[in-house]
Amino acid sequence: MARPGTAAEPLRVAIVGAGPTGYYAAEALLKNERGVVVEVDVFDRLPTPYGLVRAGVAPDHQKIKAVTASFDKVAANPRFRFFGGVEFGKDLTLGDLRAHYHQILYCTGAQTDRRMGIPGEDLQGSHPATEFVAWYNGHPDYRDYVFDLAQERAAVVGVGNVAIDVARILCRTPEELAATDIADHALEALRKSRVKEVYLLGRRGPAQAAFTNPEIKEIGGLADADVIVRAEEVELDPLSRATLDKSQDRATLKKVEILQGYALRKPAGRSRRLIVRFLVSPVELTGDAAGRVVAMLLVRNELYATATGALQPRATTQFEALPVGLVFRSVGYRGVPLPGVPFNESWGVILNEKGRVLDPCTKQPVVGEYTAGWIKRGPSGVIGTNKPDAAETVACMLEDLAQGTVLRPAHAEAAAAEALVRQRTPHCFSYADWLRLNELEVSRGRPQGRPRVKFTRVEEMLAALGR
């Protein structure tokens, strides 16, 4: 049988997930230096592309979202197709993809939050941060979620970029938010917010905080929120100081410098306070008779060096109670298993080696199945980190093609795959549909001086397209 990859018989690849990794992989496949002719079909559960760039990046970070311009160039390739509103495992099975494609690439990200594992975590008013992020970004699945913004004190557990995004959005003025593409329902709810104090809680010290320097610097420019930092909590402990002196990591040195600068500031009497804490961990959430969060018990931590030299927190005997009525946890993320795809439960990723999916019994590669992005390596890095990650996987895919190790689908024609998709999901969205929706969203935002006004319901999107 002839090897696919020619104009007469292109290599047909299905990519599950239309986030940045899916686009980076599609670009590497379509522009490969081996001269292999590839046709890429990208499937996403949502009607809209871009993954977390649309549904995860904070609305006040429009520059980061500009990366979608390069994704649109990839999508303009005539050998690229997008099928939105098509869910793997429900609308299309693994068997369906194996019958229509030579290779399958999973790029589904890390879709769930890790739990804190403390008593009271499931009380009303305690939420995963990603639910709040998806809500204010207009993700259709979270459009109707409700968060009790009548509370005056909120805590965000974690000191990564997602945690600081949540804290910052809670502290923005309605006027600041109104200049962004935040979802209308979230803008209206946040206009009425009574939140006055937001705690950002880190279990380790300032030198170990995961947020980036631009993120921590940005909060100093909030229009109506004072940033409060305790001087003693941003003073480096001996272990952190020794580690930093040895590494001379400029970014970390700058991060500590910024935080220590906040500790020297005097509050300006603004209407909100963003209080950044370090070396504290929640050990329990307590509730009232109605089952609502009313307080968080914190324990003071100290750092110790593990056998590998990593600095980890260890609880002391010092505790404090924090009165809060709203809690968002942002302590890490993990992937969700896909039907029929080998999964490493302890790591929360697809079982793989350099992107080749592995059989859990033999530990040998599963023919024709690959993975890239957070579902491959875990939730680490920024958007651009996924580009070399995707390139590594694509290199393996092309190596396997050269060896003839690909699937032999019974229906490898592009028309056959499209016919199946449209039979299963008549209302699926094409890239042309998305470009029209994008145009409409931008035009809706223009009179308000906003980047766009998003459609947040699938029914709205279909109606806007006249379907």
Image (cartoon, helix red, strand yellow):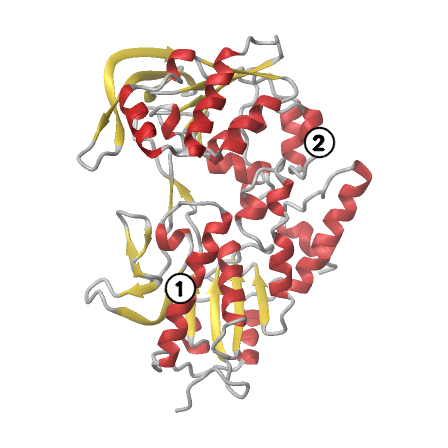
Quadrant of the rendering where the C terminus is positioned: bottom right
Q: Position of residue 133 (x, y in %)?
A: 53, 37
Judge from the rendering whether residue 138 lies leftward or rightward of residue 333; answer left or right.
right
Residue 251, quarter of picture: top left
Per the image, label 1 sits on a secondary structure element best described as helix
Residue at position x 30%, y 70% in the image: 366
Disc 1: which residue:
393
**Disc marking residue 299:** none
Determine which residue is flagged by label 2: 178
In the image, residue 98 sits, relative to residue 65, either above or below, namely: below
Q: Is residue 213 visible?
A: yes
Coordinates of residue 270 in the picture (x, y in percent): 62, 12
Is 371 placed above or below 453 here?
A: below
Q: Is residue 132 above or below residue 9?
A: above
* Label 2 environment density (alpha carbons within 10 Å; few <14, some 14–19, many ≥20): many
Which residue is pictured at 43% across the width and 45% down the height? 381
* Relative height, residue 55 to residue 176 (above, below): below
Q: Amino acid at mark 1?
A: Thr
Q: Position of residue 187 (x, y in %)?
A: 66, 31
Count of marks placed on residues = 2
In the picture, which quadrant includes the N terminus? Answer: bottom left
Look at the numbered disc 2 and give the secondary structure of its residue: loop
Q: Nearer the viewer, mark 1 or mark 2?
A: 1
